[in-house]
Amino acid sequence: MLAEPGQRVKIKVKVNGVEYEEEVEPRKLLVDFLRENLNLTGTKIGCDTTTCGACTVLVNGKSVKSCTMLAVQANNKEVVTIEGLSTDSRLSVVQQAFKDNFALQCGFCTAGMIVQAHYILKEKKPLSEEEVRDLIHGNICRCTGYQNIVNAIMDASRRMGA
């Protein structure tokens, strides 16, 4: 059954630890829902094709490109954005490592890159530089040669006890 123009669907979603119940159009993308409905603008819209990774969020603990996921698909799920990674106004280990290693330039890709780094480091196992490069291959940075990003992720891994 196709949705009628203007039709809205009620969803319940937990974002960064807060429960939301919202009505959305069935075709609204998760990235647009986060930015427009919840005013969480750290998640960026870069390509709408999953190529750049600027829109990366965690959905039920898995890395997801929110530009190709519908908000209705997040119904009854838990979403974590860049805003949900810090606690009590303190940067997360990964965020601090990015800052300390100068792993950002314009900042557009940074949120997605940090969320992806959180995802790949959740196992807390040692990673080689080659593995880190492979695990972030779906996140594009247009400003740098990636070395400081890789350094930051390796540093965060050490800080987390891997």
Image: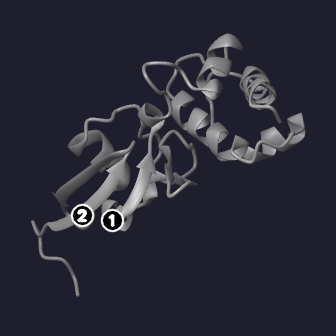
The quarter of the picture where the N terminus appears is: bottom left
C-alpha separation, residue under disc 2 versus residue under disc 1 = 5 Å
Q: Are marks 2 and 1 in contact (CB under 8 Å)?
A: yes
Give how far across and how far down residue 93 sits, in percent: 64, 25
Residue identified by numbered label 1: 75
Q: Which residue is at the far left?
A: 6
Decide if residue 55 is in sight here.
yes
- What residue do we see at 35% from left, 65% from top? 76
In this orientation, which residue lies closer to the viewer: 47 or 135? 135
Give how far across and how far down residue 88 sits, in percent: 43, 22
- What residue do we see at 53% from left, 18% from top? 106
Q: Is residue 23 above or below residue 117?
A: below
Q: Residues within 10 Å of mark 1 (few under 14, many from 20)?
A: some
Q: Is residue 59 above or below residue 90?
A: below
Using the rendered view, name the quadrant where residue 83 is placed. top left
Badge 2 element: strand
Q: Residues within 10 Å of mark 2 (few under 14, many from 20)?
A: some
Please state if 6 lies on the left or on the right of 115 as rendered: left
Residue flagged by tag 2: what amino acid is it?
Answer: Ile
Give how far across and how far down residue 58 sits, in percent: 51, 50
Residue identified by numbered label 2: 11
- What residue do we see at 42% from left, 55% from top? 78
Q: Earlier in the sequence, mark 2 or mark 1?
A: 2
Badge 1 element: loop
